Amino acid sequence: MLGLGADRLRADMNRLLAFLFHQGVLDEQFLQLQQLQDESSPNFVSEVVNIYFHESEKLLRNLRGLVLEREFSDYKKMGIHLNQLIGSSSSIGAKRLTNICVAFRAASDQNNPTACLRALELLEHEYCYLKNKLHEFFQIEQQRVMAAGVRYPIQN
């Protein structure tokens, strides 16, 4: 018999995902990513998301450096970084982060340094929120997998 804890943890995962969907943090692309995970690659989603976070941190550092330059003028380079972040965010289903990147790119296209700074701050805040929530999700998932693997003897 599987532990009841695994069922509770699955319910916790589902509630957290529903919350993130309701808030517009995630979209259906995240569910499609989950469908690619199977027994042969049980950590597929967390591995893809970890790669995303690693690469996104580099892009955020680069964007911050560009926005904070004294004589800022390289909006083209900023647009390239934003396009990369839009693509990778979209591919993992990070809907709200993607939308912020699109707004940031619009500010960049208008050569508006004040709007770019505001967009960067919002982007960094949303990035941290997403990272924390997905970290929480993967922790619950790991606990659920461990709880599901524990078999309790049936008492007669």
Image: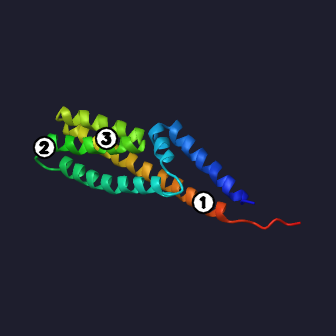
Residue 3 placement, left or right of 64: right
Q: CA distance from mark 2 to mark 1?
A: 47 Å
- Give the quarter of the figure containing the N terminus: bottom right
Front residue of 105/68: it is 105
Q: CA distance from mark 3 to mark 1?
A: 32 Å
Mark 2 and mark 1 lie on one chain; the one further toward the N terminus is: 2
Q: CA distance from mark 3 to mark 2?
A: 18 Å
Name the residue beneath numbered marker 2.
74
Tell me, for residue 86, which label it has, or none: 3
Which kind of residue does numbered mark 3 sit on?
A: Ile
Q: Is residue 38 above or below residue 105?
A: below
Which kind of residue does numbered mark 2 sit on?
A: Asp
Residue 132's x, y, as percent?
46, 54
Front residue of 44/120: it is 44
Q: Determine contact: label 3, label 2, CB under 8 Å.
A: no
Residue 31 placement, left or right of 91: right
Label 1: few (<14), some or many (≥20) within 10 Å? some
Mark 3 and mark 1 lie on one chain; the one further toward the N terminus is: 3
Residue 149's x, y, as percent?
65, 63
